[in-house]
Each structure stands twice: as C-alpha cells, then as structure tokens.
Image: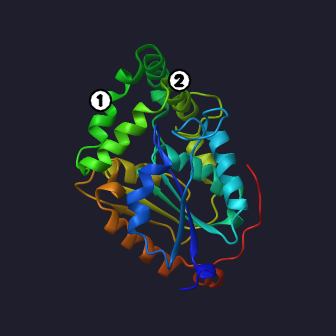
Amino acid sequence: MAASTRTPVVLVHGWAGSAESWRPIQDALDPRRWDARAVRLPGSPGGGAGPATIGHAARMVVDVLEGLASPAVLIGHSMGAQVTLLAHGAVPDLVQSEIVIDAAYAGDPESRPRMAAWAREIERDGLAGVSDFFASATRGMRPSDARQVRDDLHATAPAVIASYLRSEYVDSDAIGLSPATQRAASFRRNPVLSLHSTIESVQREASLFTPTGSASDLWEGHGHYLHLENPPRFAKALDEWLENHGVDHLSQAMPSPSRSRS
C-alpha cells in the first residue's frame, strides 16, 4: 500500500500519560495501512506550554487534524476520549471516525464535589493522591508497559494532574459529567467505536448520541489500559474497523457533514 493511501491515526493519551505510552500500539499497527502519530498534550512529559485543560488540548488536536492530508481515525484513551470528543465535534469533516477506550465521561453529576476534593488532595499531597488509582489501573499490563505508565505519572507535575481533573469534572465548561457529556456528544457526525473494560462504561457510552455505524465492545477481564494489555487485539480491531468504515465505505453510506466548531 502506498504511503499516500495510508490512513492517518491520531492517538490521544489519558490522564498523566504521554505520547510514549502509545508505542506498543504504534508497533502493532501495519505501517503499510496506518500513519499513526501520538500527540503530546500540554503539561504532559515532553508536551508544550499552555493551560492543562481539556478545551486547550482539544484545540491542539484540531490543529493536528488540520495539518493532515486526509481525515483521520481519532483515538482517545480515558481522559483523552474527552479531548477526541470535543475535537470530533469541532471539525467532523476532518475525522473519518473515532475510537474511545474506557472513556472518562458521562459520569454521575453528583460526583462533582468529590472530584473537586480529589483535585485539592493532589495539590496538597502530590502523587500520593493518585498512587492507588494508577496501581489499580495498571493491573494486568506487561511490566514494561506498566512501568511506562508509572514513569509518565512521575514525570507529570501534580499541579497539571489536578488541573486536568478539574477541567474534566469540576470547571464550568467541563464535559465529563452528565448531562454535559450528552450535549458535547451531540456534535459527533462520524461513527464511534467504543471499547470498554466494564459494563458500567458500556452503559455510560450507551447514554450518548451515536452516529450511524457506531459500535461498542466489552473486553471482559481487562483493566483500564485494555489496549496496552493486548496490542495485537487492538491492532486487529482497528484493521477491521477500517475495513468496515473506510473513507470509500463512508462516502457511500453517509452524507458529508458540514464543518463546524463548538
């Protein structure tokens, strides 16, 4: 397959993550089919300056999409799924389709005070405030991949981690809790594949608007970093997704959306 026909893939990491965390996925993807690039969100290891907020990160991803030669498959893990949701809704004509992995959204609106308290705890206690969460989230991963997650965590400033948490769930423009997630998801125009480690995550995704052709898959027995637990399975799922939702297929099945920004 010629390089010019490769499908762009934009990979967006999650909370306290990095572009390097996607290396196992990039290695598993067929380079003849995929042109995979991982973004560095503001405040992440090696990332640029700017506010550590979901809105700013989404605008940065939109800039990446605008620099590509063709629409991309947009992939977000956990917090990164909030970023891809906003980017998808802002420029749907630049998104071929979207894949979200254990998306950190559509949460209980009653959890806002708890999230605000957690952000204050992180600012007060540093990484001790998130150590239990990441220890649980990395169970089942290969030691080298779990180490990358821990290294990313320790390379991210606690103030950045707290800022993203507030931006996800506490700030006035946060979209991580219902019904704000539902409003943001209504701007999606292209198919969304959602991958989940829990039935609760499946149910949260089911509460959202899903464009024609969308699908959901529960990976039973996997943890929060399910894609890193089994990169070959994820690569196969992405290949099958392209076969069923490639540009040619979509152009026949769906009208071209008008470009908009939210």
Number of numbered discs on residues: 2
The amino acid beneath tag 1 is: Asp
Front-most of 109 and 11?
A: 11
**Dot 2 and dot 1 residues touching (CB under 8 Å):** no
Residue corresponding to mark 2? 159
Residue 195: x and y, percent? 39, 59
Label of residue 115 in the image: none
Q: Which of 36 and 221 is in front in this view?
A: 36
Residue at 29% over, 43% down: 138
Q: In this view, does 235 lie above or below 124?
A: below
Report the amino acid beneath label 2.
Ala
User: Quick check: can you spot residue 225?
Assistant: yes
Tell me where residue 25 appears, x and y as whole percent: 41, 61
Q: Is 70 rendered above or below residue 50?
A: below
User: Residue visible at 23% across and 49% down?
Assistant: 140
Give how far across and how far down residue 52 sits, in percent.
60, 33
Mark 2 Cα shell of 10 Å, populated few (<14), some (14-19), many (≥20): some
For the residues marked 2 and 1, what is the alpha-carbon distance in whole angstroms?
18 Å
> Crowding at label 1, few (<14), some or many (≥20) Cα neighbours within 10 Å?
few
Q: Residue 41 sits in which quadrant?
A: top right
The secondary element bearing badge 1 is classed as: helix
SS for tag 2? Answer: helix
Residue 187 visible: no
Q: Which mark is residue 132?
A: 1
Q: In this view, does 86 lie to the left or right of 152?
A: right
Percent across and percent down for residue 115 are 46, 26
Colouring used for the render: rainbow
Circle nearer the viewer, 2 or 1: 2
Q: Quadrant of residue 152?
A: top left
Residue at position x 72%, y 68% in the image: 257
Name which of mark 2 and mark 1 comes first in the sequence: 1
Q: Is residue 175 above or below residue 190?
A: above
